[in-house]
Image (cartoon, rainbow, N blue to C red):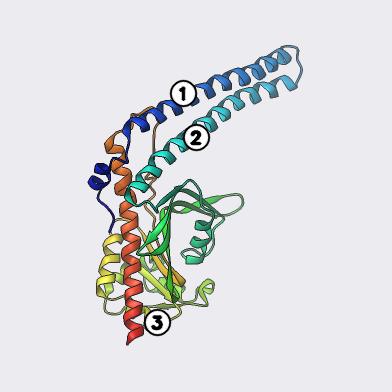
Amino acid sequence: MLKSFEEVKNQGTLNYEEFEKTRLESKAKTRKGLMMAFLIGGAILVVGLLLAFMRIAEGLILVAVGILFGFVYYYFIKKKANKELKARILGDLLIGIDPNFLYSLKDNNLPQQFKNAGFFKSSSNIYVDDVFLGKINGMDFGIGELVVKTKQGEGKTTTVFSGPFGFVETEQKFSYTTIIPDNVEKVFGGLGRLLQKVDITRLNQKLIKIEEDSDFEKYFAVWTKDEKKTKELLNEDFRVYLKGLATVNPVFAGWRDNKVYFGIDNRRDAFILKLNETISESTIRQFYEDFAKYYNILETITNYVTKGMSNTSAE
């Protein structure tokens, strides 16, 4: 159970004066970056214009380079300052929630875990932002905001997932199970289910049907290597919980080896800071609520799977 925001606030670990001081320092860095962008980019631009007036072809190239350099330099300076500010605020917030929690801008483990979860057949690029690490009931977890793209024809990509993804590393072992939005059957009906059954990308899993829950079938397609065990784990309470999540956004869940996974394709960047806006309590509270929501979803799904596995094993 996470501490409430009021409990975190009353601890005194959230120093709004320090946050505002850091914001103003970050904002000053961007101003210096803008000045440097004008100076360096402007110098290149002037040289380019002079060469252009002298009818030297390279002059026009330098003009373009000068303009582009100014914009790119300023963009990266601003982005870096924003990241440093966000890392300070979210880092302090997480420590206030639990001293063992950690915020990171990047985590190379999450893309691999996303691939292992098997939510999509393939992915060409996975971008990670705002990573949260720690323990859930003594088990290591990772949650991050991911943008996943796949190739669509020559030189084109499309975003297939954008939102929170998380995993928990348990001490139990699970048969490979993947629960994904049932978009194919939703569009093609019975033909869609037939197409799913002959999906050669999932030859090591079987598409199963939860006969007693037609509503669940409308939302999800369930692939697994152990039909009996998976149906036991997907009891009525677990199904009701997943359906409740799916009424808001497409939901993904699964378990494989010793890990439990979840993902929500909400197409939302939850942790955004603007250097021009004062850091207020409402900003920090929203950060807390978004993190707590993702944490609680991952904890709940993990509890259903691990406790359900323990119960079925005992039988």
Across and down, in percent, residue 213 comes to 27, 75
Which-is-in-front pick, marks 1 and 2?
1
> Could you say which disc has been placed on residue 154 in the image?
none
Asked where in the image residue 210 lies, by quadrant, the reply is bottom left
Tell me the CA gap for discs 1 and 3: 59 Å
| Residue at 39% across, 73% down | 222
Q: Is residue 34 left or right of residue 171?
A: right
Circle 3 sits in a helix, a strand or a loop, which is it? helix
> Could you say which disc has been placed on residue 28 in the image?
1
Circle 2 sits in a helix, a strand or a loop, which is it? helix
Dot 1 or dot 3, earlier in sequence: 1
Which-is-in-front pick, marks 2 and 3?
2
Q: Is residue 268 above or below residue 265?
A: above
Dot 1 or dot 2, earlier in sequence: 1
Q: Amino acid at mark 3?
A: Glu
Tell me the CA gap for discs 2 and 3: 48 Å
Asked if residue 266 shows in the view, the reply is: yes
Across and down, in percent, residue 262 comes to 39, 62
Dot 2 or dot 3, earlier in sequence: 2
Q: Is residue 250 left or right of residue 258?
A: left
> Could you say which disc has been placed on residue 227 in the image?
3
Number of other residues with Cα within 10 Å of mark 3, as a class: few under 14, some 14 to 19, many 20 or more: some
Q: Is residue 64 above or below residue 262?
A: above
Asked if residue 118 shows in the view, the reply is: no
Asked whether disc 1 touches disc 3, contact meaning CB atoms under 8 Å apart, the reply is: no
Which is more toward the observer, 202 or 262? 262
Asked whether disc 2 touches disc 3, contact meaning CB atoms under 8 Å apart, the reply is: no
Asked where in the image residue 36 lies, by quadrant, the reply is top right
Q: Amino acid at mark 2?
A: Lys
Across and down, in percent, residue 13 comes to 32, 41
The residue labelled by disc 2 is 79
Across and down, in percent, residue 208 comes to 39, 78
